[in-house]
Image (cartoon, rainbow, N blue to C red):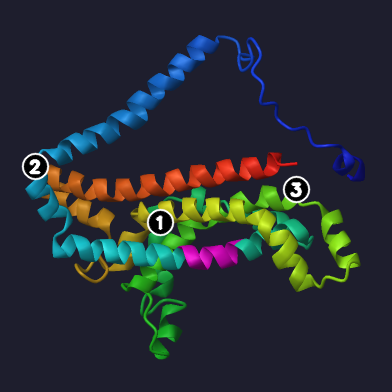
Amino acid sequence: MGGVGALPRRRPSRTKGKGQGRVVPGFRLSLGLTLLYAALIICLPLATLIVVGARLGPADYWAVVSSPRAVASYRVTLGAAALATLFNTLYGFALAWVLVRHDFPGRRVLDAIVDLPFALPTAVAGVALTAIFAKNGWFGEPLAALGIKVAYTPIGIALAMAFTSLPFIVRTLQPVMEELDGEIEEAARTLGAGNVTIFFRVVLPILVPALLAGVSLAFARCLGEFGAVIFIAGNQPYNTEITALLAFIRIEEYDYPAAAAIATVMLATAFVLLVVTNALQAYARRHELAP
């Protein structure tokens, strides 16, 4: 273990030689298949969504996306997503730190459980959370005695979003935490720095780019969550109705342009978040390559 950690880190070369990047046989074929996949599976559905939404015309489009019910759904979705992301940032950071820095019985099991939201159907998660936090549920009943209602409230929506998006923060932080050089912390400690100072002045700055990238991915995931939310939300317009559900209702009413228009709002929001994420990842790479 010690010998591996002492090996010098190889920096990726920025020079482009002849044939570089063409190690995989059939480069042109693989590139063509990749572009075809991107066009058919990613770009075509998104373009269709925009085209269908554009059928409304500017005035009708604005009337749909700015209607009181739509604005209320944006508020519920963004508020619950922000609350879920804040919780996951704190808890996910602590969980990743424990999994990387501590060895205890059941650590591997806990590490595997982190990925459970990826494997579990979101509808199943929604049903389970509703059963647990309903008025007569395991946690819902004692919480109701304290005057706290979770199911069919924005708190329940945030809880469902937090469940499905937690792995993004944990899995984004873990590789960076594993690569932290313990010698830097020891050097700071020999210079008289305390644990709090070492954490905020030495460790945290290294983790910030990865943390921000994980937060952006988790927030984007919360915006698009549907299956886990609809069971625990109650789906009351102006109160617990999320934007994805409102778009689904418009589809059930065969109002496809209105559904597409509402969806484009969330698409634009998610696109901005992904652009920010890519910028943060580029910053992290520059920071890693810096001497």
Spatial CA distance of label 1 from label 2 is: 29 Å
Percent from the top left, x then y, of residue 235?
A: 24, 65
Q: Amino acid at mark 1?
A: Cys
Image quarter of the N terminus? top right
Give the residue number, with chain letter if any, for mark 2. 57
137 over 27 or under it: above or below: below
In this rendered view, identify the residue nearer to me: 174 or 188.
Answer: 188
The secondary structure making up most of the magenta span is: helix
Number of numbered discs present? 3
Image quarter of the C terminus? top right
- The image quadrant of residue 198 is bottom right
Residue 87 lies in the magenta stretch = yes
Residue located 70% across and 67% down the image: 200
Residue 166 lies in the magenta stretch = no
Spatial CA distance of label 1 from label 3 is: 28 Å
Give the residue number, with chain letter if any, for mark 1. 222
Q: Amino acid at mark 3?
A: Glu
The reply, left or right, for residue 35 in relation to residue 111 is: left
Q: Which mark is residue 179?
A: 3
Mark in front: 1 vs 3: 3
Sequence-first disc among 3 and 2:
2
Classify mark 3: helix, strand or loop. Answer: loop
Percent from the top left, x then y, of residue 256?
A: 14, 43
Mark in front: 3 vs 2: 2
122 over 80 or under it: above or below: above
Point out the stretch of residues depicted in magenta. 85-92
Sequence-first disc among 1 and 2:
2
Percent from the top left, x then y, of residue 54?
A: 14, 39
